[in-house]
Amino acid sequence: MSQIQTQRVLDKLDEYFSRNDYLSAERHLLYWKNEARAINDNRCQLLFLNELAGLYRKLAKENDAIQTVTELLDLIALMGIENNIGAGTTYINCATVYKAFGKADEALPLFEKAKAVYEKELPDNDKRFGGLYNNMALALVDLKKYKEAYELYEQAISVMQTVDDGDLEVAITYLNIASAKENELGAVECEAEVSSYIEKAMEIFDKHEKRDGYYAFVCEKCASVFGYFGYFLYEKDLLKRARDIYERA
């Protein structure tokens, strides 16, 4: 059993995030990462490094993020867990870091590793496939491999349509497809197809009944996409929905 009470560490981390106190969150994670390393607790070290990678990606701290990815991949090799679920999730986190900093060519092999692990270890309808396929497709779009990206988006939709409350992830996928179509075809040529996918996403947002914190988070996350494509009133509406939920909490 670990000497580190990971839930308490994560609860404190959530407290910092709730205040947008990212400097304290970084110090907190670095402290506990070093504690885990000092007592050779590789499992906890892996957990805290994954959190750090996400934080540095959010803060656009490229050098720190890439260094954390290197530490994560070295630790997986040291632990000899290259083919387990935890490694698969870590590969996705590392790949997402590379993608965020314009390194889609380095992200893709890690997504492929994650895909191999997940397809071997998880049932076909596991919701984790939705996130994997969406993120991997985003990297493929950056590399202009559109056919492969659309295939993965369709797979993501197929999985998330079978998962409880997976409809919001389907909406996100429709928005990703709309962005990919613009990237591939150009703003004018893609207009009809983009409108179709945007309207599908809007329908999901409007019909979704569970107006909770996650719904608010997705509304905030996706609002700017609607605005980008000219749906300014809908962008404002989604942001208002999110504010109303947070104010009631």
Image (cartoon, grey):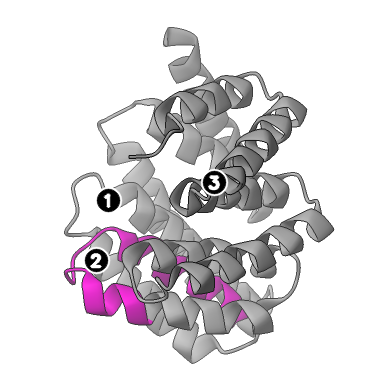
Determine whether label 2 and label 1 are within 8 Å by CB.
Answer: yes
The one nearer the camera, 95 or 5, is 5
Q: Which residue is mark 3?
A: 222
| Mark 2 / mark 1, whichever is N-terminal | 2
Give the image location of residue 67, x and y in percent.
Answer: 75, 62
At 68% across and 25% down in the image, what residue appears? 20
| Mark 3 / mark 2, whichever is N-terminal | 2
Residue type (three-letter) at the residue carrying disc 3 = Cys
Magenta region, residue range: 116-142
Which element carries disc 3, helix, strand or loop?
helix
Residue 180 against residue 143 in the figure, above or below: above
At 53% across and 78% down in the image, what residue appears? 110
The one nearer the camera, 184 or 135, is 135
Residue 24 against residue 249 in the figure, above or below: below
Mark carried by residue 166: 1
Q: Looking at the image, is mark 3 or mark 1 nearer the viewer?
A: 1
Measure how far apart labels 3 and 1 are at the Cα level: 15 Å
User: Does 44 lie within the magenta span?
Assistant: no
At 68% across and 69% down in the image, what residue appears? 98
Which element carries disc 2, helix, strand or loop?
helix
Residue type (three-letter) at the residue carrying disc 1 = Gly
Residue type (three-letter) at the residue carrying disc 2 = Val
Q: Quadrant of residue 120?
A: bottom left
| Mark 3 / mark 1, whichever is N-terminal | 1
User: Does 121 lie within the magenta span?
Assistant: yes
Q: Which residue is mark 2?
A: 159
